Amino acid sequence: MEPIRFINPQFRHARSSRIKTRTTTMNENTVERRAVRRHKVLKGATISFDGNGVSCIVCNLSISGATLELASSINLPSSFTLEIKADQFIRRCRRIWSRDKRIGVAFS
């Protein structure tokens, strides 16, 4: 596995060893279960699968995953490639959750 290139300098402080899952109540309906804090980035990206490409916005990003927003609600495969060309960032992803036009992914 290739090393992760950090997009945001704040990522250098992310805990990479002895990761413990944080559970934080964001409101009465949402519970934070991510092991590593995500950082807001708002960058254009492309989701690639089966020779197709779909544009998206990366809303937040960590060393282990991201939240993506699509222009419309579409069916995506369970795994695909995410590319942020501006940062030369390419990762294989698997879909963890989806809600309307937003999806949460974990990097493989």
Image (spheres, rainbow, N blue to C red):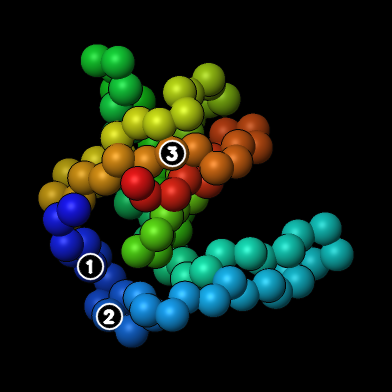
- Please, is residue 3 above or below residue 69 in the view? below
- Alpha carbon of mark 1 to alpha carbon of mark 2: how far? 7 Å
Query: Is 43 situated left or right of 25 in this image?
Result: left
- Alpha carbon of mark 3 to alpha carbon of mark 2: how far? 24 Å
> Can you identify the residue that label 2 sits on?
12
Q: Nearer the viewer, residue 30 or 101?
A: 30
- The percent position of residue 20, horizontal first and vertical second, equals 54, 76
- Please, is residue 58 above or below residue 18 in the view? above
Type of amino acid at the residue the image marks with label 3: Arg
Type of amino acid at the residue the image marks with label 1: Phe
- Is label 1 or label 3 in front? 3
Disc 1 element: loop
Disc 1 + disc 2, Cβ < 8 Å: yes
Numbered label attached to residue 94 = 3
- Alpha carbon of mark 1 to alpha carbon of mark 3: how far? 20 Å
Disc 2 element: helix
- Is label 3 or label 2 in front? 3
Choose the circle earlier in sequence order: 1 or 3: 1
Disc 3 element: strand
- Please, is residue 15 above or below residue 48 in the view? below
> Which residue sits at x=37%, y=41%?
93
Numbered label attached to residue 6 = 1
> Which residue sits at x=42%, y=55%?
65
Disc 3 + disc 2, Cβ < 8 Å: no
Choose the circle earlier in sequence order: 3 or 2: 2
- The percent position of residue 85, horizontal first and vertical second, equals 17, 44
